Image (cartoon, rainbow, N blue to C red):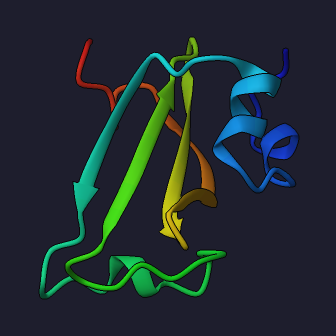
Amino acid sequence: MSRTVEACATYELESEILEAIGQPDESEVLTIPVKSGWGLQEALRYKVHPGERVQQWLYHGTDQDLCVWFAEVANTWRVTLVLSVPSNVARKIH
């Protein structure tokens, strides 16, 4: 089970991520703030407009955590961005 950006970058669906690396250590569904441009970044596979939902999954690592963001496309959560971040950046549980 490889919890790396490279291992997850080719997956499209929530179910594929679950099958490949299992349940996340943390997850939440957020709404993009009205004045935010976060969801329109070029790096995102699927754009998420202000007021739309995004799902974030976090897999804990020793020094780096794996973050997987999903956009809701036609009522299906699809991988829009996979990043590795320092373990103290995104965690709710420290």
Which one is in front, 93 or 56?
A: 56
Q: Is residue 75 left or right of residue 50?
A: right
Locate residue 73: give its quadrant.
bottom right
Q: Nearer the viewer, residue 85 or 80?
A: 80
Please give the name of the residue rendered at 47% of the width and 36% of the height, measured from the top-left corner.
57
> Is residue 51 left or right of 89 when viewed as pictured?
left
Q: Position of residue 62 (x, y in %)?
A: 57, 11
Please name whichever residue, 90 or 49, is drawn nearer the observer in this view of the structure.
Answer: 49
In this view, the residue farthest toward the front is 75
- What percent of the width, then of the height, locates residue 21? 74, 21
Horizontal side of 27 relative to 24 (left or right) equals left
Residue 89 seen anywhere in this rendered image of the structure: no
Give the percent coordinates (x, y) of residue 11.
81, 50
Location of residue 92 with respect to 11 vertically, above or below: above
Quarter in which the N terminus is drawn: top right
Residue 69 coordinates in the image, percent (x, y): 51, 53
Q: Residue at x 12, y 84 (%)?
A: 34
Q: Is residue 6 visible?
A: yes
Using residue 59 as the reference point, say whether residue 32 is left or right of it. left
The total of numbered circles placed on residues is 0
* Quadrant in the picture for residue 12: bottom right
On the rendered image, what quadrant is the C terminus found in?
Answer: top left
What residue is rendered at 29% in x and 47% in y?
29
User: Residue 74 lies in what quarter of the image?
Assistant: bottom right
In the image, is residue 38 above or below residue 54? below
